[in-house]
Image (cartoon, rainbow, N blue to C red):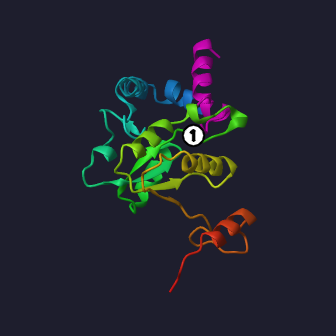
Amino acid sequence: MASSFEQLQQQLKQLPGLGYRSAEKIALHLLVEKPEKLPALVAALQAAAQSVRRCQRCGNLAEAELCAVCADERRDPGIVCVIEQVPDLVAIERAGAYRGVYHVLHGRLSPIHGVGPAQLNLASLLARVAAGGVRELILALGNDVEGEATCHYVTQHLPTGHEVKVSRIGFGLPSGGGVLYADPVTLRSALEGRRDYA
């Protein structure tokens, strides 16, 4: 294959969720089957690279200083949902059950992978709490060792003198799922996260 094709395939392969075959398929689709779509894709990538940045307040994607969520006056700025990545925000928004705001950490603590507090968007979260106005932090991080470590770090480093409720999203059985096929971690989380029914 041509070296330029190989370079395109290598770049595509670096995208999350794309392996060698998927990258090859996309490259062939763009170059051979639908070459007329390539200029629009390149233009969209260049436009996004020039205009999309991180929200100054929460770390979400934005084209202005604030993202659409932070700029929305109908949202409750006193309730902040702390998430790992932007796709988590998209998933929560899709559910349509949350009207507060967010704070995107862009990862979670993982000393094994060299990710410490300085590599995450943690300092701005703590500064946000210190500035006042935050009544509740909802920790919506993964239910694993790294997620727990990140939650622990946040709670241990909250500024003193501010009454902030800290909650954690519930984990447990998926809707339509049963106890029989759940793994031990999920069952433990479901039991620990139980709530009053009556």
Q: Position of residue 170 (x, y in %)?
A: 56, 64
184, 19: nearer the viewer: 184
What kind of element bears circle 1?
loop
**In this rendering, is residue 93 above or below 192?**
above
Magenta-drawn stretch, dominant element (helix, strand or loop)? helix
Taking the magenta stretch, the answer to whether it contains residue 5 is yes
Q: Residue 123: percent from the left, percent from the top?
A: 49, 36
Other-residue count near label 1 (Cα within 10 Å), few / some / many at <14 / 14–19 / ≥20:
many
Quadrant hosting residue 45: top left
Query: Badge 1 is on which residue?
Result: 107
Q: Locate residue 171, reporting x and y percent.
A: 60, 64
In the image, 191: left or right of 74? right
Residue at the limit of the structure toward the front, as seen here:
161
Position of the N terminus, as image quadrant, is top right
Say if the magenta span includes residue 35. no
The single residue placed furthest to the left in the displayed view is: 73
Which residue ends up furthest to the bottom in the rendered image? 198
> From what the image shows, is residue 156 above or below residue 11?
below
Front position in the image: 164 or 173: 164
Direction from residue 66 to residue 179 in the image, left or right: right
What's the residue at 52%, 25% (across, down)?
32
Question: Image quarter for residue 53?
Answer: top left
Who's the residue at 58% across and 48% down the image? Answer: 156
| Residue that appears at 47% across and 53% down | 91
Q: Magenta span covers which residues?
A: 1-24
Label 1 is placed on what type of residue? Gly
